Image: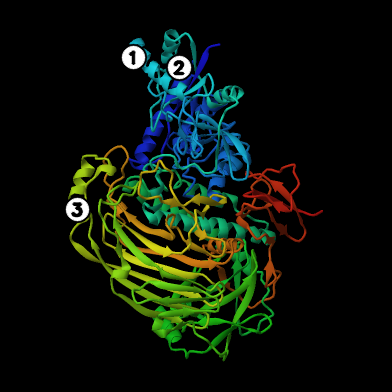
Amino acid sequence: MKKKVYIVSHSHWDREWYMPYEQHHMRLVELMDDLLELFETDPSFKSFHLDGQTIILDDYLQVRPEKRAAVQRAIDEGKLQIGPFYILQDDFLISSESNTRNMLIGMEESKKWGTPVALGYFPDTFGNMGQTPQMMLQAGLESAAYGRGVKPIGFDNEVLADDHFTSQYSEMLWEGPDGSKIFGLLFANWYSNGNEIPVDEEEAKAFWDQKLADVEKFGSTNHYLMMNGVDHQPVQKDVTEAIRTANRLFPEYEFIHAGFTEYLEAVQKNLPEDIGTITGELTSQETDGWYTLANTASSRVYLKQWNTRVSRQLENISEPLASMAYELTGHYDHDMLDYAWKTLMQNHPHDSICGCSLDEVHREMMPRFEKANEVGKYVAEEAVRRMTEAMDTSAFPEDSKPFVIFNTAGMKRSGIATVEIELERKTFKEGLPAKLYQELKERPSKSYHVVDPSGKVVNAVISTEEVLFDYDLPKDAFRIPHMKRFVTVTVEISDMTEFSWETLALVEGDARTEKEYLVSNDGRILENEAVKVTINEKGSLTLLDKETGKALENLLVFEDVGDIANEYIFKQPEGDQAILSTDFPHAIEVIENTDIIGKICLTHTLEVPKSADERLEEEQKAVIDFRYRKAQRSKELVPFTIRTVITLDRMNKHVGFETTIDNQVKDHRLRALFPTNIQTDTHEADSIYEAVTRPNKVSSHWENPTNAQHQHAFVNLHDEAFGVTVSNFGLNEYEIIDDTIALTLLRCTGELGDWGWFPTPEAQCLGQHTFNYSIECHGTPETRFETYRHAQSLQVPFVTEQLAHQTGTVAAANQFLSVEGATFAATALKRRKSDNQLVLRGYNLAADPVDVTVAKDGFTLQLLNLLEEPQEQKISEQLQPYEIRTVGFEEEK
């Protein structure tokens, strides 16, 4: 039987990268024009794989709308192979839900056109998430193809016992942490191994002699895949002629023009018994460690912070609030939310969210973030407006100022909420703005406190009265500008249940309660019943966890080092010594000190080199591999001021940090260090639908002196008695160094890197930056999950809104639905597009089963997959280890 070679024509289409988006866009238009012509003129050209992403169709038709019918015809005839995703994302740097929406929207878009290719397609993702097998199966995909994360070794090499991420073959099984298994296809010779096939016989003979030897080295069967294309590659118009040449020259092979469906069916029928199995996340652990590209997690940190902000807005605020409001209004704006999600996901391709493109590319990303965020805010505000207009506040005194607080996170929470309460207004029709402003400013100030519906005083801090301009936008009239007199209320929230709301009110009068303040010793101590924070002589912190009696010292030490690599990869100059904040003076200022919250500002002023020396630019221009650069840091030192507001509230164990810098330094990296005194071999971090366990030590193959890792909300070190969780907001890079959690705040470089010299001065991230993160201790290992859930919920603020004093049909306090499960992390509360059914999604953080109870009065539960399609299985009360679960709520009849 002949060996069979499947030639798949494609072009890996980075929407934006080493050229601005529109430059790539116009080349895409030309590619699609050529394809549509080729489909008509060469009947032997079987198909073209459209890189697994449906957004290409939108991008093309935006310029060539008249080609819609031709595109549809090409898809109907199987010439244009589409889907199943919306974009090709970087899966580690976007949220769990973003990865799911990429499939959900991608599948929906694909099915509008035809049948998507049943292949999870990750050709150039910078590492692959461990939950991919479970996610693919829950989307009806039984195979995945990927270019990174596994080191192929070929037939004649033995897979060693400690090599968990190597494979004999380019074909393998991939098992997720929950036990799900799919077929895995590694592009062992990259996704360009069949690019630009010669037609000339002499050239073709040399080409195929080499290419066939390469592919047979790793192939487990006599079915071989040749990828005819590469990044932004124009279609090879004479590929079918080249195939005919190959068939003449190599009669022992059969060369065919094919699509993935044909190849996958053939190769899986002939897999050998010794096919290997890889497990969990794939991040090139068995390489020298330089090209894992994990440092893209710290490139242009501002992108990651914006991405977190918009993700939390859509996933954890807008959709839950809109889902709640639906029960009152029967309205859920899927179109608006789809628009927001698509706009956000345009920033999620691996060269976009990774921050490893030209400045023009990342400049264009900012309006997308802002647009998606504003749409999300609008949806949330409309949902809140519709509910608050009908909310019953009649239990409060008539002269009070009621307000509502929503907890849209999926867990019970305590913390601090803020709300602006308007005391009085004067509209512009009542007089000149300046006169109205002055009238309100001259009102005598009053004392206020906060009460619940029963009249019980609630701990709160009320600001002094202020006057500012504002306006209303009625739904049925012209805008109403006005001046308002208001106060800002900071209120303590205790054990507020998940997906709920409660109502309080501001009333006149002094509460006259005894108060114990949280800050003492001129700002050097912050303390509540759970923890005590002390600022030491050198400006680091000591944290005492009162429950365990453990004290951690030398926390919050800032470390600055040089970086002479690029947007993809960090490299410290040879011999460079870290500059530490403990070697410089510090200052302390008390910002806020009340009975519910304490804030102090800790300021460090370091002296650091202003940049790398002149040699770096010469090495960049010469395209010298960053590993062999000799550049050093400049000898000219400049002041580098780091201001950190340290916050502790009365109700919680976590200590919050907000660090602000005005960065005028180039070619460097800034980190915050948290030593833990914990000696252990592994740690855990927040990843995609998983609290993933990772080794603290690198493999024997590793040469890179650093080992940066990806995270979302947290990273944790623990032993059998004690643990430390460091959480963050949009700071996706950390490193474990012995017992220390090193959190990257900022990394500044001046070039893209990769295959040429592409200057990126804006990647130096000059200007003001603010970073938010926190630390929380715990006891025995089973208690760590509460800190994980806290870290995730800290990214979701309470939503507040002032109310009118009124009767209404919506209760002043209500729990929309309840979710109980010690290790259950909710990721979505939304409405299904097809029928507006309420949908809840989440996963098990733990490696052990957990009992989970989800309940909503008047509804029964139905098991769904990730595409939110009904499943036949009944819902178990137990969530299995690392299980991702989606449930729909069916109204009882």
Q: Which residue is mark 1?
A: 203
Displayed quadrant of residue 737: bottom left
Displayed quadrant of residue 753: top left
Point out the frontmost of discs 3 and 2: 3
Of marks 3 and 1, which one's residue comes earlier in the chain?
1
Query: Identity of the amino acid at label 2?
Result: Thr
Residue 426 seen in the figure: no
Estimate the spatial distance between the alpha carbons at disc 3 and disc 1, rounded to whole Å. Answer: 47 Å
Q: Residue furthest right?
A: 893
Estimate the spatial distance between the alpha carbons at disc 1 and disc 2, rounded to whole Å. Answer: 26 Å
731 displayed left or right of 86: left
Point out the frontmost of discs 3 and 1: 3
Above-or-below relation of 730 to 290: below
Residue 275 in the image: state x and y as whole percent.
57, 29
Q: Quadrant of the N terminus?
A: top right
Q: Which residue is mark 2?
A: 41
Q: Which residue is mark 3?
A: 613
Label annotation for residue 667: none
Residue 191 in the image: state x and y as whole percent.
43, 30
Q: Residue at x 48, y 56 (%)?
A: 308
Of marks 1 and 2, which one's residue comes earlier in the chain?
2
At mark 3, the secondary structure is loop
Q: How dense is the environment of label 2, judged by Cα within 10 Å: few (below 14), some, or many (20 and up)?
A: few
Of marks 3 and 2, which one's residue comes earlier in the chain?
2
Q: How dense is the environment of label 1, judged by Cα within 10 Å: few (below 14), some, or many (20 and up)?
A: few
Q: How dense is the environment of label 3, judged by Cα within 10 Å: few (below 14), some, or many (20 and up)?
A: some
Estimate the spatial distance between the alpha carbons at disc 3 and disc 2, rounded to whole Å. Answer: 57 Å
Point out the frontmost of discs 1 and 2: 1
